Structure formats: structure tokens, C-alpha cells
Amino acid sequence: MLAMEVHGRRYTAYHRPADFFQAWQQCRLMGGQLAPIESEQENSQVVAAIRAVGDLRQQWIIGGTDVGFDGNFLWIGLNQQINYANFFDGEPNNHNGGEDCLTIGIAGTDKWNDIPCHHRQIGFVCAFTD
Ligand SMILES: [Ca+2]
Ligand SMILES: [Ca+2]
């Protein structure tokens, strides 16, 4: 209980078009990681970070992927499987067999979606720990 602050993450959203791997590299170069989200509270923090620079009418890249093993999602910066999940209804659907990277902001909600990793989105969210 009350483990919500245990990770001590700060999230920053970047309104900067990028695909998953570009976003992953940019977060790393800035000393952070492409955002993992491990609780409802962290999901809210990510939404707040996005609203500081944009909105949820478009999808923003976060750090989840099942590349290499469909249906087995992990946080790329943590090397850990996703436990807390906040997918939109019907997602992840691996549409056309080619969706391996996660976004937040599908249909204007704070829910997640899987998309093709090479699709550029409006921006991405990094997480930083002190
Ligand atoms: Ca997939
Ligand atoms: Ca999808």
C-alpha cells in the first residue's frame, strides 16, 4: 500500500515528432528513459506532463514495447514486464500484425494503444529519476 511514490519519477513530455526508437534514444541522451507507467498515479503524472505542452487529441509515445515477442509487453527502460496496464478498449490489438510500441492518448483519452514502432507521433514522454 501507498507505494505510489516509490519510483520517484518526474515526467517530461516533448512536443517533438519522433518514432519509438528516436524517442527512446532522445530520452536516453537527455539522461532519462522513455516513460514507464507503473500506476494510475504515474499515468496521471504523464497526462499532466503532456498537457503542459499539448493535449491528448494525438498520441504520445511511452516506453512500452512487445517487439521481439508479441503480446509480451515490457518497459524498455526498466527491462521489466508491464504489470499495471491502462489500455483502451480492444487494445492492444497488434493491428495487421505490426504494432509493437505503445502510446498514450488514443481517442482523446488517457488510455494506451499499440502502434507500429516506425510511425511518427506528435511527441513522446521521458521519465527522469534524481
Ligand atoms: Ca505487438
Ligand atoms: Ca493498436
Image: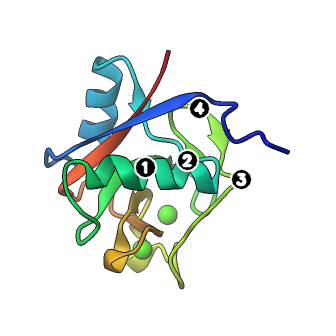
The residue that mark 2 highlights is 42
Determine the CA span between mark 3 and mark 1.
Answer: 17 Å
Give the residue type at disc 2: Glu
Nearer the observer: mark 3 or 1; the answer is: 1
Q: Is residue 59 left or right of residue 45?
A: left
Nearer the observer: mark 2 or 4; the answer is: 2
Determine the CA span between mark 4 and mark 1.
Answer: 17 Å
Q: Is residue 29 above or below residue 126?
A: above
Q: Is residue 57 above or below residue 63?
A: below
Direction bottom: furthest residue: 90
Nearer the observer: mark 4 or 1; the answer is: 1
Between disc 3 and disc 4, whose residue precedes? 4
Q: Residue at left 47%, top 72%?
A: 94
The residue that mark 4 highlights is 78
Whether the residue carrying mark 2 lies under 8 Å from ligand 2 is answered with no
Q: Could you tell me which secondary element the residue under label 3 belongs to?
A: loop
Q: Position of residue 120 (x, y in %)?
A: 19, 55
Determine the CA span between mark 3 and mark 4.
Answer: 12 Å
Q: Could you tell me which secondary element the residue under label 1 belongs to?
A: helix
The residue that mark 1 highlights is 46
Q: Could you tell me which secondary element the residue under label 2 belongs to?
A: helix
The residue that mark 3 highlights is 83
The quadrant of the image that shows the N terminus is top right
Between disc 4 and disc 1, whose residue precedes? 1
Q: Residue at left 38%, top 51%?
A: 48
The answer to whether residue 130 of the structure is visible from this angle is yes
